[in-house]
Image: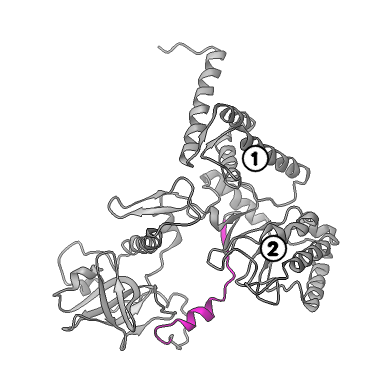
Amino acid sequence: MRIPLVPREREREMSVAMKKKVQRKFKMRGYTLKVDALDAVISFASRFSGAEDDALDLLLDQLEHESLKSSIIDKDPVNRVVNLLLEAEAAVEESPNAACDGRGSAFRVIDAFLVPKFHYDPVKKIFYEHTGSLPIHGEASAKAKLYKDRFLLLYQRLSRDQHFAKPAFETDTTDFGSCEISPIQSLVGQTGRRWVMGVISQLEDGHFYLEDLTASVEINLSDAKITTGFFTENTIVVAEGQMLLEGIFKIFTCGFPPLEDRDKSLKALSGLDFFGGGTLTKEETLRLAELEKRAVNDMFIVMSDVWLDNEEAMGKLETVLDGFENEEVVPSLFVFMGNFCSRPCNLSFHSYSSIRVQFGKLGKMIESHPRLKEHSRFLFIPGPEDAGPSTVLPRSALPRYITEEFQNHIPNAIFASNPCRIKFYTQEIVFFRQDLLYRMRRSCLMPPSTEETSDPFEHVMFLTV
């Protein structure tokens, strides 16, 4: 029989368990805590009885924004983050009707650089999360790994599709509507039609190949029947074709890997947080779903190419803000997507101070609408020609130098990456600003299909069975 613990022994046991939990969570993120930092973290988590895990996750998320000199953390950065979170909590308590981006609130913005990263193990057929920080400049192998991870991500989804699964019995596959995927390496010496999945690449000038993890083969697309969509270099496709005597794989039909039902994907991913923002328990999801049903007045206002240096555009914007200021219920969120300047902010652009001033004027304009300032949130996403360290996607948020004056007027504004993600109650939304149609149309290997269709899923792979 176990002897009941006296209060002091019980407290000591709980303290040891808390220390182990904190150390484990920080180690999973690649951090090691000094003794004084560990005490500060435990003191912070103890404020939230019954929700210590959520408090620790929030602390770790915010800690990633700090400029840390080492993975060994002392109490100074921990104290800074704790003070910031406590101030934010106090602000929320003073204004309970305002939307915030905390866990379990109406919406939360997830920066592209903070999205969890997972890798697929094709042998064990499981995903595992990448832990630790990532370097700003990747190694030479990082680019190849990017394409490998993307291929495996689609391949594991395709392997669950009944049409492409290997038949349980060796029979004629067409009798059962099965189109088993063959590795490209196995095409050598094969006759008849085969289904393959691979990446379209140009290994030689003017010659296109289909690659998977086993081999590559030159392809002939001259008579290929394609589905709706844009087929460019580096596109992953599912194709049906036949090997010719010349060693070229002639493609008859070509399309994209089929979509998968969301519920089926979530079940297969075992509750992993691919979207970001943290996983929710079943009770939390039901609670948010109920709140979402009641939030019939919530709305997002999305605007793009708001040129701050254009007087006509700014005048029209003020008219929009005036209209919503006088509405009975103001919008929950305003999303401003670039470009924010009528001229490209490239290497020949030198008027960054003027953009800073224009953002300051925008801040004053919003500040002059007190109901919007108090009850709405403002999200800014850079466009393809806005100021930033690079034009490579994902693009980081607008530089602080440009937005500082705006934030003096609207402190709760959010400046996020492009693309960025938003969790709105149980919904998952992605905001992405890019001239994709122009870029993809210019890079098409084959003219896209011009046949009109009302089927929203026609872009997926059609089956010739």
The image quadrant where one finds the N terminus is top left
In this picture, residue 100 sits left or right of residue 313: left
Looking at this view, is 8 or 406 the one in front?
406
Residue 103 lies in magenta, yes or no? no
- Mark 2 falls on what kind of element? loop
- Between the C-alphas of marks 1 and 2, the distance is 31 Å
- Local crowd at mark 2 within 10 Å, few (<14), some, or many (≥20)? few
Residue 439 lies in magenta, yes or no? yes
Q: Position of residue 39 (x, y in %)?
A: 59, 27
Amino acid beneath label 2: Met
Image: 65 above or below 174: above
In this picture, residue 443 sits left or right of residue 343: left
Looking at this view, is 153 or 215 the one in front?
215
Looking at this view, is 224 or 269 the one in front?
224
Start and end of the magenta stretch?
Answer: 427-447
Residue 322 can be seen in this image: yes
Which residue in the protein does label 1 denote?
81
Which residue in the protein does label 2 denote?
299
- Mark 1 falls on what kind of element? helix
Report the residue at 82% width, 58% height from top: 371
Amino acid beneath label 1: Val
The image quadrant where one finds the C terminus is bottom left
Report the residue at 58% width, 67% height from top: 432
Q: Position of residue 354 (x, y in %)?
A: 77, 68
Residue 332 can be seen in this image: no
Per the rendering, the mark at residue 66 is none
Report the residue at 75% width, 71% height from top: 308
Looking at this view, is 314 or 95 the one in front?
314
Q: Position of residue 206 (x, y in %)?
A: 34, 84
Q: Position of residue 457 (x, y in %)?
A: 44, 74
Question: Of circles 1 and 2, which is in front?
Answer: 1
Image: 153 above or below 102: below
